[in-house]
Image: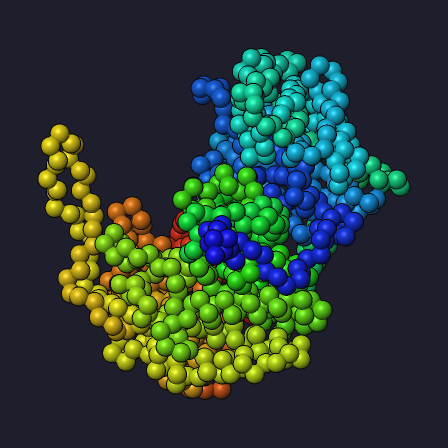
Amino acid sequence: AAAWGLWRARGGLAVTPHPAARLLPANGSSAAAAPGLFWGSYRPHVYLGMKTRSPRAPVTGLMWLLPSEGEAPPPPLRHTCEQSDRLAGYGWLRHDGLTFGLQEIRDRGLRLRTEFVKRPGGLHGGDWSWRVTARPERSAGPPPAFISLLFYVATDGQGILRPLVVEKNRLASLTGTTEELGDFTITFLQPTSEAGTGPLYASYNYLHARAEGLHRLSDVVKASLSPRFVYAPPGGPKRRYAGVDTYQGPPDGRERQSQLVVHQVTVALPCRLEMAFESGSVSDRAERLVGEVLTQELASHVAAFDQRFEEAFGLARKGFSAQEQDFAKAAFSNMLGGMGYFYGRSLVQSPHSELPQPYPEGPLFTAVPSRSFFPRGFLWDEGFHQLLLSRWDPALSCEVLAHWFDLMNAEGWIPREQILGEEARTKVPAEFVVQHSSAGNPPTFFLLLQQLLAQGAVDAPYLRSLFPRLQSWYDWYNRTQAGPVPYTFRWHGRDQDTQMFLNPKTLTSGLDDYPRASHPSPEERHLDLRCWMALASDVMAQVAVHLGEPAGDYQHMAKLLADNQLLEQHHWAKALSTFADYGNHTQAVALEWEKPRPPSPGQPLPPPRLLRVVRKPPRLQFVGGALGYVSLFPLLLQLLRPDSPHLGTLLADMRSEKQLWTPFGLRSLSRSSPLYLKYNTEHDPPYWRGAIWININYLAVRALHHYGRQEGPFRQEAASLYQELRANLVGNVFQQYQESGYLWEQYHDGTGKGQGSHPFTGWSALVVLMMSEKY
Ligand code: 6A9
């Protein structure tokens, strides 16, 4: 019994891997098994970086410094994607996920174009080259007189780098060896004009240092900068600049597992720099992938991309302008090019263990919501991401899904937010790191599976190996998120504090502060989760039938959860005349400043607190005052029968400007809700309380498209709303991109303006599917 207790205290099943065979074979990401995907731009959190799909991958990257005359040194170093850098825009404009990418970065008076091309060959993932072109940006004030570009290579605990320095400080090349790459050479070409003539005059700096880890690279470079260098082109003025010099390093005793080599080039604009990675095992290399050869390969990749994009999405055929097509390519490419390969472990709190426990280590190959703010995997975001990416490369989506399902524990749970490895950890405040093994998140992977099945894109062996884990996942929701009565569901793990929040949040639902019952209780039933489970059951049934497995239970569940009468019984609030959650609820709540508390003798006055007052006690009832995305779920997930009178009601709520309709898309919460645009605490601004979110709008457009084709009394209405809503969303996200240079996390319901984190080419990129009408 003591041993049992200890096992539970150490996390028990919560940190035990699922017993089913893994979907991904051991070494499945290796250069031998998957050479094409070995190298990639799998470091979405840096402006430009590549690595291999390995646990301890060596990395390459780019940093830059603008001259800092007048400013106090050190000048700002650009490296990791930071909103505080206030770049005018950056992102992949073309990226095929496999062989090439083209990015544009606009920073003050500077326009950087970063391009890479991979070339297969040998046994270790082949060769690749980078080209960075720096130009003055005409529209953005005076261009910088010169710029410093810092190319770096770093190891992560494994492998060695041998720099070759010529002419004082110029790193001409380096050779290296790692377990997985074998021997390789990286050559740094001297800067040229944009047309390739040169070399141009430049100053060089070089650093060879050891860092505590990849998460410390910026710190090491910053600490090594010295302002003592002078850039003095012939005939030009002498100018001081900061260059990498020497690095003292942290106090002894700390492990320094990364070897870092930096090549800094200080040069006038415009210019072009190239760097070529060559694998030692390529024996039949005809020509080096630089200069004219690189130019030609880039051009042919762009042409191939454009053709494939048109085949996949048909935007030219549909009459979209060249600008609109470029926008769609950028949205798509930055999602695909923003994919990351992460390796590490989550920190998991189970209800039984006292302290958070380390989860087993593992890899995750995934897209990310935002390269600056959330450059890591999020469970329900990923289902949406792959709806888009599977239209380009369904095999890639299957592989991503396999990675996520291999992270399942023995209980059938998959952690919601994946913060794997030191680099990912540095972006997350401590209080957000721990994942709770009782916390769910919408199972959007069922949407993906539904689509992949419809596309005929999953083969039987894959589906068969997925099945045991899929069953466990489905069971996990049924078991742990069951509602108070059969066939109802409840998001467990809501905030319990009823005093501090205007409405306790439901982070697990993905809709965070969307209003729910005012007083969390086990009696709650959540409409959105019930609809998700209807979809899940239906897809489970489909998969089981496909595999010849027993499907009866799934079919039974799917049938009951799709039963419109049962749905009404559990969720139709007659008095509110809409679908709603049910729970212990009162609408008579408000935040008020607490009366000043008497100070204790000798103590400073305690600061006043904003607390919730409840003017009328809660009682079990349908949750009023919360019309919005949740109310729409029976429509969004297409559970309503086309002849349901409630379909008409929901369409009317959608189209009403007093409620959900705006010229820019559907707002998350009705303008008539008492919680519309309300802060949840003094410091917690409204999030899902009015703003326009593109993932839910995508579901809405998709559902309207569906109902617009079903025989029934609301067919016409749905079809015309479809046209209108689609045009509004596409129009606004496009216009905001033109104006601001970014896709955004959400859009303001009054002005259409992008807000929240950016770039957010996570689910906001679903506009591409709306444009292409792929549902
Ligand atoms: C905060 C602070 C640098 C919130 O897109 C990811 C998620 C969605 O899944 C969810 O539905 N976003 C939405 O309501 C962002 C969540 C970020 C939480 C971590 C850490 C980072 O500071």
Q: Is residue 17 left or right of residue 679?
A: right
Q: Is residue 255 left or right of residue 644?
A: right
Q: How many numbered badges does the structure rendering display?
A: 0
> Does residue 524 appear anywhere in the picture?
yes
Q: Is residue 315 left or right of residue 622?
A: right
Percent position (x, y) of residue 335? Answer: 57, 52
Quadrant containing the C terminus in the rendered view = bottom right
> Does residue 51 appear anywhere in the picture?
no
Percent position (x, y) of residue 703? Answer: 48, 73
Colouring scheme, one of rainbow, by chain, secondary structure, one colour? rainbow
**Rendered image quadrant of residue 286:** top right
Residue for point 63% across, 23% down: 209
**Rendered image quadrant of residue 166:** top right
Residue for point 26% across, 47% down: 682
Task: Decide which of 120, 209 is in the foreground and name it.
Answer: 209
Residue for point 57% across, 39% down: 47
Task: Decide which of 302, 649 is in the foreground and name it.
Answer: 649
Task: Decide which of 504, 480 is in the foreground and name it.
Answer: 480
Say above or below: 318 vs 142: below
Extreme residue in the front direction: 1
Residue for point 59% across, 48% down: 361
**Rendered image quadrant of residue 72:** top left
Q: Is residue 277 left or right of residue 110?
A: right
Say above or below: 238 vs 540: above
Percent position (x, y) of residue 309? Answer: 66, 59
Percent position (x, y) of residue 725? Answer: 44, 67
